[in-house]
């Protein structure tokens, strides 16, 4: 599954799938950043690759750096949390 997803993202980044390659949504951009991060690319390399492929639609260096830090620490705080929210009852 992960290889299929990486192939899809790289095809979108290379522009071989459609004419609207530059219209990646935030989830696809995050996926591309995570894929490149897992391949061992540095933040600067990731930013360069995305800047070359997405041009003015590429995320900023600071955004890529923040996401790479989250991926490195294992944090998924920006992902949606399905299910019911947790409630707390305090007895007085």
Image (cartoon, helix red, strand yellow):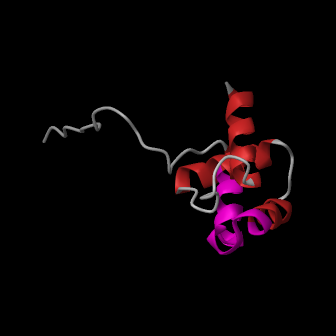
The percent coordinates of residue 73 (x first, y second) are 68, 46
Q: Is residue 49 above or below residue 82?
A: below
Give residue 5's quadrant in the image.
top right
The percent coordinates of residue 49 (x first, y second) are 81, 61
**Quadrant position of the N terminus in the picture:** top right
Tell me which secondary structure the magenta stretch mostly adopts.
Answer: helix
The percent coordinates of residue 16 (x first, y second) are 73, 49
Q: Is residue 15 left or right of residue 49?
A: left
The percent coordinates of residue 22 (x first, y second) are 63, 62
Residue 69 in magenta? Answer: yes
Q: Residue at x 75, y 63 (%)?
A: 53
Camera-nearest residue between 54 and 70? 54
Q: Residue at x 55, y 44 (%)?
A: 76
Q: Residue at x 78, y 48 (%)?
A: 36
**Quadrant position of the C terminus in the picture:** top left
Q: Is residue 33 left or right of residue 77?
A: right
Tell me where the magenta segment starts and ends, as one range. 51-70
């Amino acid at each position: 599954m992960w290889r299929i997803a990486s192939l899809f993202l790289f095809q979108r980044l290379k522009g071989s799938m459609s004419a609207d390659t530059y219209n990646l949504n935030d989830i696809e951009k995050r996926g591309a950043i995570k894929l490149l991060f897992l391949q061992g690319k540095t933040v600067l390399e990731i930013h360069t690759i995305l800047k070359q492929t997405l041009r003015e639609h590429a995320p900023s260096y600071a955004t890529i750096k923040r996401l790479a830090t989250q991926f490195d620490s294992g944090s998924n705080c920006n992902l949606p949390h399905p299910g019911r929210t947790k409630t707390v009852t305090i007895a007085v």
